[in-house]
Amino acid sequence: MSVSETQQAVWIAESEQDTVALAEQLAAWAVPGMVLALDGDLGAGKTRFSQAFAKSIGIKGIVNSPTFTIIKEYEGAKLPLYHMDVYRLSLEEADELGLDDYFYGDGVTIVEWASLITDLLPPERMQLYIEHLGGEKRRISLSGIGAPYAGWCSQLEAMGASGT
């Protein structure tokens, strides 16, 4: 599968536990260099998704939004996690941080507000857009770009996510 191949899926989370289940499934597929690009309105659940993912790869302790620190690094039992929040950065400021060291490193990178730095993201990645639908309900639109991400979207569809 080439970078130009993209597969999409939609995960409807009726509850917080459904959002956690998606994070756990993606964490089960975690490999070094995995990049999850998260977007969604304030309060949509980006940080909650990140917390569930972190727990699933064996990170103990509190995982919170890196809003003011920009990048937080965590050591997990399975892989390190690089958790970023680029909401307050310009594209130029983000470029100066040397993000490629994280994107192509030994761990998993989760980028909140990733659409603000699209030009800096690796060509292969999983993009997630989380929409708050009221109460605990969320629509999580996934776009797997390149291998293995497109394949994971296909597997999610087979597990019950509705394709777009």
Image (tube, rainbow, N blue to C red):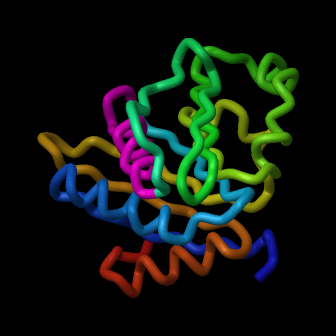
Q: Is residue 35 or residue 51 the one in the foreground?
A: 51
In terms of secondary structure, what is the magenta stretch mainly? helix
For residue 23, above or below residue 110? below
Residue in the picture at 34% in, 74% down: 161
Image position of 43 (left or right of 9): left
> Whole-percent x and y of residue 8?
52, 70
50 in the magenta segment: yes
Residue in the picture at 51% in, 82% down: 154
Residue in the picture at 31% in, 63% down: 21
What is the span of residues highlighted in magenta in the rendered image?
41-56
Task: Please identify the residue farthest to the bottom as the structure is shown.
Answer: 158
> Whole-percent x and y of residue 132?
27, 41
> Whole-percent x and y of residue 53?
44, 52
Image position of 101 (left or right of 85): right
Residue in the picture at 42% in, 42% down: 60
> Whole-percent x and y of residue 5?
72, 75
Q: Is residue 141 or residue 82 the one in the foreground?
A: 82
